[in-house]
Amino acid sequence: MFDKGNGPAVVVVQGVHGRWEWMTPALTALARDCRVISYSFSGDIGAREGTRGTYGFDNYLSQLDAVLDHAGLPEAAICGISFGGFVALRYAATRPHRVTSLVLASSPAPGWKPNPQQSRWLSRPWMSAPVFVATSPLRVWPEVRSALPSWPERVGFFVQQGLRSARAPMVPSRMAERIRLAQQTDFAPDCARVKAPTLVLTGEAPLDRVVPVASTQSFCRLIPGAESRLFERTGHLGSLTQPARFANIVGHFVHAHNH
C-alpha cells in the first residue's frame, strides 16, 4: 500500500494490471501536494485482502472501504485510471458521503467493449501474456514519442517502467477476470447517481490505443456537471509518461473541491 504526502486525501485506483507499484512516478508527484493512497487490487500479489466470490465486482468497493478505513479517512477524493475508473465511478455513486471529488482518467464508460484484439487476449490470458508483453513497446511507441521529446527520456521510460513491471508482476488471469466482471456490470445508472464534482481527463484520440477517447468523454454527458480536460501530447499513459503534469491537473482539481 502506498500512503505518502500531506494535504487533501486522494485515493488513486489503478488500471486492470492491479498493481499500485506501476503508478509510482504519478503517485510520488501527486504526493507533493496531497496525501496520496493507492493499493493493489484484492486477490492480487501484495494485496491486503483476497476476493470473495459472492461479491463479484463489488469486491472492489468493499476493498476501497477497507483502504479508507485503514488510512483513517472518513472521506477522500477518488481518482480512477483506466479500469480503475469503473471502481471509482461505482464507489462515488454508492458511497457519496465518502467521496469529496472524482477524477476519471482515460476510463472506459458504460457500453465500452474490448476490441477484437483485446478480446483474444482476454480469452486466453496466460497464453497471450508473452505476446502482449513483447508487443507492448510497439503499441505505446506513438504515445511515448509524442509525450517524451528526447531519446534519453524515451529509453529511460521503457527501462524504468519495465523494471517496475518486473518487480510487481501482473497476473493475466486476474486481469481477464476483472474485465469479465466489469462487462457483467451495468454502470450506466451509477453515472446519474454521482454527486461529487467530477473531472474527466483524456489524452488525444489518435494516441490512446486502449480505450477510445470518445468513450471516456461520454462521461461528460452521463455525469451531471462533469468537467472535461484534454491531456495534450498523451494517450492512455499520460499518468506514466507525464507524471508531473498529471499530478498538477489532478492535484489542482482535488484542492479546488476539498472541504
Image (cartoon, helix red, strand yellow):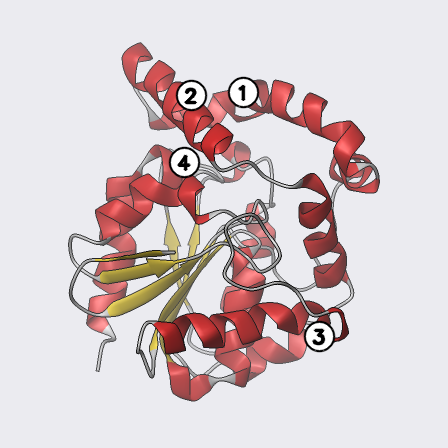
Lower position in the chain sequence, tag 4 or tag 1: 1
| Amino acid type shown at disc 2 | Phe
| Residue drawn where x is 36% and y is 33% of the image | 241
Assign the N terminus to one quadrant of the image: bottom left
In the image, is residue 222 above or below residue 252?
below
| Residue drawn where x is 52% and y is 39% of the image | 205
Is residue 176 rendered to the left or right of residue 259? right
Mark 3 Cα-neighbour bin, 10 Å: few <14, some 14–19, many ≥20 = few
Which residue corresponds to mark 3?
55
Lower position in the chain sequence, tag 3 or tag 2: 3
In the image, is residue 143 above or below residue 106?
above
Image quadrant assignment for residue 72: bottom left
Which residue corresponds to mark 1?
137
- Residue 234 is marked as 4
Foreground mark, 2 or 4? Answer: 2
Lower position in the chain sequence, tag 4 or tag 3: 3
Foreground mark, 1 or 3? Answer: 3
Lower position in the chain sequence, tag 2 or tag 4: 2
Q: CA distance from mark 2 to mark 1?
A: 8 Å
Q: Could you tell me residue 62's position as x and y percent? A: 56, 75
Lower position in the chain sequence, tag 2 or tag 1: 1
| Amino acid type shown at disc 4 | Thr
- Residue 158 is marked as 2
